[in-house]
């Protein structure tokens, strides 16, 4: 089951020219600088932007071709745009019901979604009275309650505060896993993307620069130096964490030694192998890529330390990760 | 003080305004929609033609309409050859004149309302499963209600005050084309100032009330 998109759409300074095949499972992130065509690509898939060259197929069904354009209503897309686009003349509850009452089957339950999005107390409010963050939460809930078969999200959580955003990113993961709801999202929060996405598509000037599984993309440029972070799956011998989950590890939270350090406050000490060393944009600093039981992560160390410890590719070292630095996805 | 002929003119004027308003709301809505959202290079020209009655003397419009609707005009002659009657000096004729004359007063507020709304709410509604028609009815209509109210009241009020076009096309036939403004003119010509006063003050009162309703709607957000 795939989503394929072929499109050549003229934009202001360049063409959006893509030929993409994406899986219809898991979370796929669209990444790229502002104005690289991410929003346009979402609009093309959603059918908001039609052009003779556009060809979109979802799970074997033609959504858009030269001859045919499937009406928006029949695509069943959960669309959340940069501006929340709530219906200002309706209350929050009426906004939520708009898609809910038109859906055929309800696999996402009203109470669950309302509660997860923290809307229980807002239902009777007019949507024009809401703050930007509240509007985004309503827009997200409204899209979910329409029982979509694909979520297309364009910076859906940009107006939320840090803690709330974390919650929603975790909720997105949960939706993808429990309901097999495919998600395609645009976010500028690279750490969010690294944390929950399964796949990444990198856009530059309207072209696909790179695409593939997030773990592999994080090990490659340009994401490697942009994020300097890895995602590992626990349990991993040496990590105090034993539960099965995804952890993100920032390169700056990892230090290296040649031997385990006893009596240290750092509880996570992992025997690892130096897999590669990468230059960074900052002179005097190195990104050391470590391998540990088939998983990869980075340590950010100084060039001086590399020389002093006489490190080399293939060498065994102990990676120290402060427990407090292990970021749990929700 | 008012004669039966005055009441007849009042009734005729209200009829003309109501019919014109109804016709214009139907005609102007799709036209305004097109003007609000089209990327066509003809948009500027169409907008200019729609706005023409704002700048042309009503007599110019009335003159050409009289020629077209009269027995020798393109429209009038066609109707006569089909066994009908030409439209000069008829109620239908002044309705046609009023519709054209008030077109910008319907199209402009509607175009503005549609533009202010934008297409996005409709696309979102469709993505939530609504058909195009449902989206128009449940989203566009309520969101643009203010535009429709302004368009309707302006057209209605503007038609009440219409003079030149009607005089040119319709003349002053009691019960057929003799509307208030024309009757006031006739009263004045006949030096019947008290009747002219009564009707004029009435029109002023109606105009003030209607405009107050229109502008009163625009409350600060």
Image (cartoon, coloured by chain):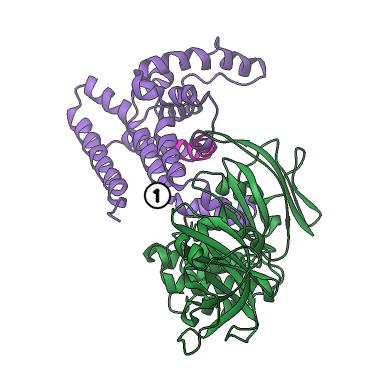
Chain colours: A green, B purple
Image coordinates for residue A167, horizontal then vertical, percent? 50, 75
Please say if A45 is above or below B12: below
| Image spot of residue B213 (x, y percent) | 30, 49
Q: Nearer the viewer, residue A217 or A104?
A: A217
Q: Quadrant of residue B157?
A: top left
Which one is in front, A265 or A132?
A265
* Residue highlighted by disc 1: B146
Q: Residue at x 55, y 9 (%)?
A: B72
Q: Quadrant of residue B208?
A: top left
Residue B138 seen in the figure:
no
Q: Is residue B30 shown in magenta?
A: yes
| A84 lies above or below B194 | below
Residue A272 placed where, x, y %? 62, 74
| Magenta highlight on residue A212 | no
Instruction: Tell me where residue B173 appears, x and y as whole percent.
Output: 40, 24
Q: Nearer the viewer, residue A41 or A21?
A: A21
In the image, is A152 to the left or to the right of B54? right
First to last magenta residue range: B20-33
Q: Is residue A250 visible?
A: yes
Q: Chain of mark 1?
A: B
Q: Note whether B19 is above or below A150 in the view shown.
A: above
């Amino acid at each position: 089951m795939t989503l394929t998109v072929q499109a050549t759409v003229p934009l202001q300074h360049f063409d959006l020219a893509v030929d993409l095949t994406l899986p219809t499972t898991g979370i796929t992130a669209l990444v790229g600088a502002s104005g690289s065509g991410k929003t346009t690509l979402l609009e093309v898939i959603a059918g908001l932007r039609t052009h003779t060259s556009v060809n979109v197929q979802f799970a074997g069904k033609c959504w858009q071709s030269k001859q045919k354009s499937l009406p928006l209503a029949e695509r069943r897309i959960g669309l959340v745009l940069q501006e929340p686009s709530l219906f200002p003349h309706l209350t929050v509850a009426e906004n939520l019901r708009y898609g809910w009452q038109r859906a055929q089957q309800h696999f996402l339950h009203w109470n669950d979604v309302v509660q997860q999005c923290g809307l229980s107390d807002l239902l009777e409010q007019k949507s024009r009275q809401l703050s930007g963050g509240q509007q985004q939460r309503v827009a997200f809930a409204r899209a979910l309650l329409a029982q979509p078969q694909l979520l297309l999200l364009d910076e859906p959580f940009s107006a939320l505060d840090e803690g709330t955003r974390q919650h929603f990113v975790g909720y997105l993961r949960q939706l993808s896993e429990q309901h097999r709801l495919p998600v395609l999202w645009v976010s500028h929060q690279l750490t969010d993307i690294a944390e929950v996405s399964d796949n990444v598509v990198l856009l530059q000037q309207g072209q696909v620069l790179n695409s593939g599984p997030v773990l592999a993309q994080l090990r490659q440029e340009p994401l490697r130096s942009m994020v300097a972070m890895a995602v590992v799956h626990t349990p991993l011998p040496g990590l105090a964490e034993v539960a099965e989950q995804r952890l993100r590890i920032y390169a700056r939270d990892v230090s290296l030694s040649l031997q385990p350090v006893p009596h240290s406050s750092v509880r996570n000490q992992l025997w690892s192998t130096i897999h590669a060393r990468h230059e960074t944009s900052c002179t005097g600093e190195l990104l050391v890529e470590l391998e540990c039981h088939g998983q990869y992560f980075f340590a950010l160390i100084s060039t001086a330390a590399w020389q002093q410890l006489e490190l080399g590719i293939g060498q065994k070292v102990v990676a120290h990760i402060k427990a407090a630095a292990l970021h749990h996805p929700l | 003080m008012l004669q039966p002929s005055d009441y007849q003119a009042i009734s005729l004027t209200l009829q003309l305004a109501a019919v014109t308003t109804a016709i214009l709301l139907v005609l102007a809505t799709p036209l305004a929609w097109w003007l609000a959202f089209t990327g066509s290079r003809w948009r500027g020209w169409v907008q200019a033609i729609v706005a023409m009655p704002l700048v042309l003397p009503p007599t110019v419009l009335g003159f050409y309409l009289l020629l077209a609707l009269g027995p020798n005009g393109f429209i009038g002659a066609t109707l006569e050859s089909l066994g009908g009657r030409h439209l000069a000096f008829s109620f239908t004729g002044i309705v046609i004149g009023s519709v054209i004359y008030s077109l910008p007063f319907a199209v402009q507020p509607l175009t503005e309302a549609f533009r202010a709304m934008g297409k996005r709410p409709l696309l979102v509604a469709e993505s939530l499963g609504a058909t195009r028609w449902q989206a128009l009815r449940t989203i566009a209509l309520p969101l643009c209600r203010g535009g429709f109210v302004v368009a309707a009241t302006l057209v209605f009020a503007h038609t009440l005050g219409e003079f030149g076009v009607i005089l040119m096309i319709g003349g002053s036939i009691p019960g057929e084309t003799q509307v208030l403004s024309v009757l006031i003119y006739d009263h004045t010509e006949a030096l019947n100032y008290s009747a002219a006063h009564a009707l004029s003050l009435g029109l002023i009162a109606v105009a003030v009330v209607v405009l107050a309703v229109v502008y009163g709607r625009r409350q600060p957000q």
